[in-house]
Image (spheres, grey):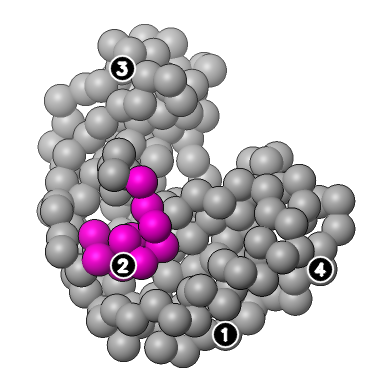
Amino acid sequence: MAVSMLNKVVMDDTTRTGRWFFAIAIEGPIAEKLTELQTRWLTTLRQSDKVRPIIANNLHLTLRFLGPLSDDELSHWQQRSRKICAQSFTLQLANLGYFPRAKTGWIGVKPSTPLTSLAAQLDVSERWQPHISLLRALSADALPELPLPDASWSVNAFYLYHSDGSGTPYQRMQRITLG
């Protein structure tokens, strides 16, 4: 397991109050397919002016949300991520879904033992639903019947991300390479 720091972590008011999370990045052809799916989804909506698509640079599959962290907590999670023991694996897109409380439309992935095992090493909640958020500010009746992209991809790494909560691209702070 190789771990590399991508950005120097300086704990200040922004990083302390921002949100931290571990996630699998969605990039390249998969991100392009998901951006196309977002566009098709938006065309099915009657009132799409309030709906916000997730920008392509922010597409990810969250493994563990950490929230705001103190210096000690951040250090703990960085050290813990260095002890992760997992091999590369493949994920495949599965189904559209909707989280009513967050008003978020998402696409799920097919069940995967390697993904579940990786998440378990990060103490993920039993309620964890692996997904990639696509649209925010959706209403409950906005879950269309759309053909899904037939897409699978190899996962060779995951990241420790930081978000300042403003909607700007998330910062990848640490890369954890899978074996």
Please tell me the numbered disc located at residue 4.
1
The stretch in magenta equals: 116-125
Residue 89: % across, % down: 21, 74
Q: Is residue 119 magenta?
A: yes
Q: CB of mark 1 within 8 Å of CB of mark 4?
A: no
Earlier sequence position, callout 3 versus callout 2: 2
Q: What amino acid is labelled 3 in the image?
A: Ala
Measured Cα–Cα span from mark 2 to mark 1:
18 Å
Instruction: Identify the disc placed on residue 118.
Output: 2
121 drawn magenta: yes
* Amino acid type of the residue tagged 2 in the rendering: Leu
| Quadrant location of the N terminus in the rendered image | bottom left
Residue 172 drawn above or below residue 127: below
Q: CA distance from mark 3 to mark 4?
A: 41 Å
Find disc 4 in the rendering and name its residue.
Answer: 10
User: In front: 116, or 147?
Assistant: 116
Residues at marks 1 and 4, CA–CA distance in whole angstroms: 16 Å
Identify residue for label 3.
142
**Seen in the image, is 63 located left or right of residue 148?**
right
What number is the disc on residue 79? none
Q: Residues within 10 Å of mark 1 (few under 14, many from 20)?
A: few
Q: Circle 4 sits in a helix, a strand or a loop, which is it?
A: loop
- Circles 3 and 1, Cβ within 8 Å, touching? The answer is no
Tell me whether the residue at label 2 lies in contact with that at label 1, contact meaning CB atoms closer than 8 angstroms: no
Foreground: disc 3 or disc 4? 4
Disc on the earlier residue, 2 or 1: 1
User: Which of the marked residues, 1 or 4, is nearer the chain's N terminus?
Assistant: 1
Q: Say what secondary structure mark 2 lies in.
A: helix
- What type is the residue that disc 4 sits on? Val
The residue that appears at 36% across and 10% down in the rendered structure is 46
